[in-house]
């Protein structure tokens, strides 16, 4: 594979605690794992996001930690324009959403190469554990409910995919299987998967910065088989009822 010599200017979008963001910033800094990645912007839609303070502690300048709140940018168009402006003026190469809970308009991803971190298994174009309402613990609950209803072994995954206009619908560029256990709850599973999400995002950025364009991952088998559709529907519905806010 061909190596690239330039550093990638990176933006990270967060809504909450920013633990993945912190892991990426450390990998760009003292860990030197992401030596060809230059984190130049942290953006949040939530002024109270704990990740903003983590970014400050990691050395991100005040001017490069910005908030684009829904109260200030209630429409997707104005929000997207503001986000794109901040990225373009910093010559951004890559945008990664790490627990970012607002839709990024397609005209942004048309200009800025963008990826999204997801806590469950995805199969774009087919039945999977993503889409509207599938974030946070709702994803983990859906996986557990599905695994209980089918007659075969099943594991969950941490995922990274290309960000597109379809929620969780872009091509996969990174997956990491994570085992399920009988005593798992959504909370327990979330805690087990999260460190793998951190490592996976770093791995994706490493491959992108060192070797250039990422190759989409093609699944040999569908996540949800034809005879499992009803089990999948029931699992998704149960999870959304249990965790309506993710």
Image (cartoon, grey):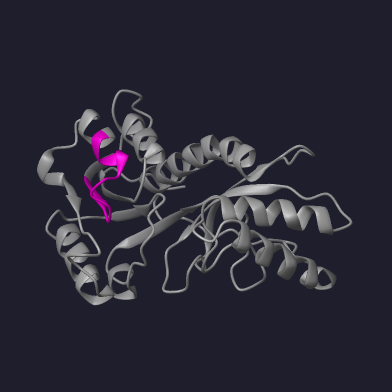
Q: Which residues are magenta?
A: 41-53
Quadrant in the picture for residue 100: bottom left
Which of the two residues, 73 or 204, is positioned nearer the viewer here? 73
Please tell me which residue is depicted at 55% across the width and 38% down the height of the picture.
196
Provide residue 67's location: percent of width, then percent of height: 20, 53
User: In screen coordinates, is 189 left or right of 230?
Assistant: left
Please tell me which residue is depicted at 46% across the width and 46% down the height of the picture.
204
Which of the two residues, 99 or 35, is positioned nearer the viewer here? 99
Furthest-top residue in view?
Answer: 30
Provide residue 180's location: percent of width, then percent of height: 73, 41
User: In screen coordinates, is 48 left or right of 134?
Assistant: left
Quadrant in the picture for residue 226: bottom right
Judge whether residue 45 is colored magenta: yes
Residue 148 drawn above or below residue 185: below
Q: How many marks?
A: 0
Please tell me which residue is depicted at 68% across the width and 42% down the height of the picture.
185
Provide residue 69's location: percent of width, then percent of height: 22, 59
Quadrant in the picture for residue 183: top right
Residue 182 drawn above or below residue 222: above
Judge whether residue 17 is colored magenta: no
Please tell me which residue is depicted at 68% across the width and 62% down the height of the picture.
238
Which of the two residues, 240 or 38, is positioned nearer the viewer here? 240
Residue 19 drawn above or below residue 139: above
Furthest-right residue in view?
Answer: 151
Provide residue 182's location: percent of width, then percent of height: 80, 39
């Amino acid at each position: 594979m061909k190596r690239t010599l330039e550093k990638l200017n990176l933006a990270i979008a967060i809504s909450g605690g920013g633990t993945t963001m912190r892991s990426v910033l450390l990998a760009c800094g003292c860990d030197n794992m992401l030596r060809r990645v230059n984190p130049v912007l942290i953006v949040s839609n939530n002024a109270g996001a704990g990740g903003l303070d983590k970014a400050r502690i990691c050395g991100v300048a005040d001017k490069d930690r910005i908030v684009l709140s829904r109260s200030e940018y209630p429409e997707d168009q104005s929000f997207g324009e503001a986000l794109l402006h901040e990225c373009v003026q910093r010559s951004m190469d890559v945008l990664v959403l790490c627990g970012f809970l607002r839709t990024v308009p397609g005209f942004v991803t048309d200009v800025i190469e963008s990826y999204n971190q997801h806590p469950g298994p995805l199969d774009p174009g087919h039945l999977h554990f993503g889409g509207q309402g599938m974030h946070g613990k709702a994803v983990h609950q859906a996986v557990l409910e599905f695994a209980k209803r089918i007659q075969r072994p099943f594991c969950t995954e941490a995922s990274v995919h290309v960000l597109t206009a379809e929620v969780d619908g872009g091509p996969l560029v990174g997956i990491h299987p994570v085992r399920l256990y009988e005593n798992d709850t959504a909370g327990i599973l979330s805690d087990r998967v999260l460190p793998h999400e951190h490592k996976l995002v770093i791995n994706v950025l490493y491959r992108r910065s060192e070797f250039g364009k990422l190759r989409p991952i093609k699944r040999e088998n569908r996540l949800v088989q034809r005879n499992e559709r009803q089990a999948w529907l029931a699992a998704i519905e149960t999870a959304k009822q249990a965790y309506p806010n993710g």
